[in-house]
Amino acid sequence: MPEWYTAETVPADLWPDLDGIDPDVVQTLLDVAQGQVLAYAPALPDGDPPANYVLAQVRQAVNLWRASVVDAGGGIGDGESFQITPHPLDWHVKQLIRPKKGRPRVR
């Protein structure tokens, strides 16, 4: 079973700009993300988390990092007509934690 990621164990392919971030900041983001994943997730028995929760932890940590460095004034592109607004616990992370099942069936 997987374990929660730490600053030392996050694979570079899951967080491409990881090398440029202070490891203490990375660990703080991972800790916060883990708490958010656990708060959103259904209750789990004790033990190691499932793989989807661990992936959601690192994805959420990346989202938190990007939200902290994005230029809220639209600094991407021309700075006027294009702007990124990061959202906490986006749909992708939520889907990792609580995957939607198929369509409901009516009998």
Image: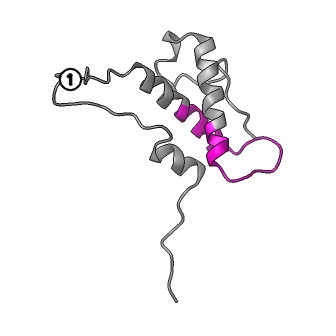
Give the color scheme: rainbow, by chain, secondary structure or one colour: one colour
Which element is circle 1 on?
loop
Q: Is residue 26 above or below residue 87?
A: above
Residue 6 sits inside the magenta stretch: no
Q: Is residue 23 above or below residue 40?
A: above
Question: Which range of residues does the magenta coloring cover?
Answer: 36-60
* Farthest-out residue, right: 46
76 displayed left or right of 10: left
Return the x and y of residue 56 as percentages of the image width and height.
58, 40
Return the x and y of residue 49 as percentages of the image width and height.
73, 42
Q: Quadrant of the N terminus?
A: top right
- Under mark 1, the amino acid is Gly
Count neighbours of disc 1 (C-alpha within 10 A) and say few if under 14, some if 14 to 19, many if 20 or more. Answer: few
56 displayed left or right of 74: right
Residue 50 sits inside the magenta stretch: yes
Q: Residue at x 66, y 35 (%)?
A: 35
* Viewer-nearest residue: 80 or 13: 80
Q: Which residue is mark 1?
A: 77
Where residue 47 sits, quadrant-wise, is top right
